[in-house]
Image (cartoon, rainbow, N blue to C red):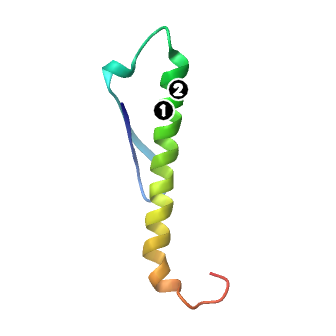
Amino acid sequence: MIKVTVTGDRRLKAININPEAVDPEDVDMLQDLLLAAVNDGLAKVDAETANTMGKYTKGIPGL
C-alpha cells in the first residue's frame, strides 16, 4: 500500500501511497503503514550496508 525509497545514506527519497490506502476515517492506519514502510526501508539499508561492509571488515577487531 505504501512504498518508500531510501538512499544508502539513510535519506528518504520518495513516498508512494496507493490511493486505496487513503481512508479519511482511518488516518491512524495510514500513519501506521507509513511508519512501517519507512522503518522497513531503513532496515534494508542497514542490512545491505552490513552485508557489503562485512566482507571488508571481517577479522578486524571492534568492527
Which residue in the rendered view is the most extreme toward the left? 19
Q: Is residue 5 left or right of residue 39?
A: left
Separation of residues labelled 2 and 1 (CA atoms): 5 Å
**Identity of the amino acid at label 2?**
Gln
Which residue, given by chain and number where applicable, does mark 2 sit on?
31
Tell me the SS state at disc 2. helix
Which residue in the rendered view is the most extreme toward the right? 62
Q: Residue at x 53, y 29 (%)?
A: 32
Which residue, given by chain and number where applicable, does mark 1 sit on?
34
Residue 26: image x %, image y %? 50, 14
Residue 61: image x %, image y %? 65, 89
> How crowded is the residue under tag 2: few (<14 C-alpha within 10 Å), some, or many (20+)?
few
Q: Quadrant of residue 18?
A: top left
Q: Are marks 2 and 1 in contact (CB under 8 Å)?
A: yes
Residue 10 can be seen in this image: no
**Identity of the amino acid at label 1?**
Leu
Q: Quadrant of residue 3?
A: top left
